[in-house]
Amino acid sequence: MAGALIDAFGVLYGIRHGETIRLVATRGRAGLDPVGIFASRVRGHVFLTEEDLERFEKNEANVALVISGETGGFFVRDAAGSIETVRSYEEFSLTTSAPPVAVAKRGVVKKRRWYWAASVLLLPLLYFIPNKPPPALALHLNEDAGQLHITWNVPTKAKLTIIDGAHRTSVNIMREQSSLTYARRTGDVTVGIGSLQSRFVGPALPPTVIESERQRIEALQSEIVSMRAAHITGQARLATLQRRLQ
């Protein structure tokens, strides 16, 4: 069923020349080595999902190609071995011209001329593969020493809402943003994106230095009020005794 536009994923094959890798096909054949992965989605944005990352690490890939709708992009490791998951090295349109052949060298994708031969690499992505729906929005909370690390798996335009005890905070999410760190105030924090919510329940935080000083001052003020009341009461009793002695 050539031409069927549905989700697909697989391995990229190519040729290695020292530190340089050239992508050739999405199907293995003699003379080609597995060098990366690809993911093709009917709609959405060009980014690496958690499942893409798992396949990327499992295959020890050097490059990933993501196609979403009519837009594609390449993702590569940097010199330190890490990979940007939200923004591709370079996005391209599938409708204006053929995509570039990606050449990776030590985690850097270098620009090359536009080769029509690269269209052969993308044609297998349009064949029928069992449909896999796009990932649903997922929200994860991880706490470390009072810092709440909030992550989500797909780009969204919805606002992020944080309810921390009696405090409520709204944050506008940028298109390329996928995480946020929040310094919690209480042990009960609810985080929501649209209708999706996740709740963190943990121990109350110890008071800060400022809060401790404020509590100490409030205790001293309360003690002063009590001492003044006792002083006034003592003076009244003394006055009563003096009147009786006259």
Image (cartoon, rainbow, N blue to C red):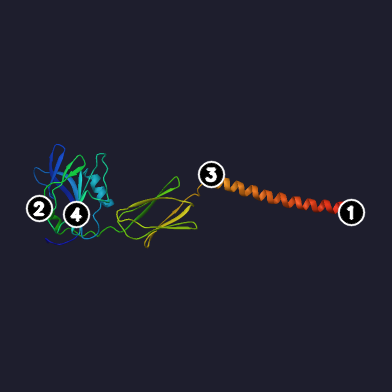
Look at mark 1 in the image and give the residue it sits on. 244
Which amino acid, mark 2? Val
Q: Nearer the viewer, residue 132 or 48?
A: 48
Nearest to viewer (mark 1 / mark 2) = 1
Residue pictured at 35% horizontal, 51% vertical: 179
Tag 1, which secondary structure?
Answer: helix
Where disc 3 sits, the SS reads: helix
Residue position marked by numbered label 4 in the rendering: 72
How far apart marks 3 and 4 lie (CA) works out to 52 Å
Left or right placement of residue 86 versus residue 125 in this view: right
Of the image marks 1 and 2, the number of the one nearer the N terminus: 2
Q: Which residue is mark 2?
A: 120
Disc 4 residue type (three-letter): Gly
Q: Quarter of the image for the N terminus: give it.
A: bottom left
Disc 3 residue type?
A: Val
Find residue 209 and name its label.
Answer: 3
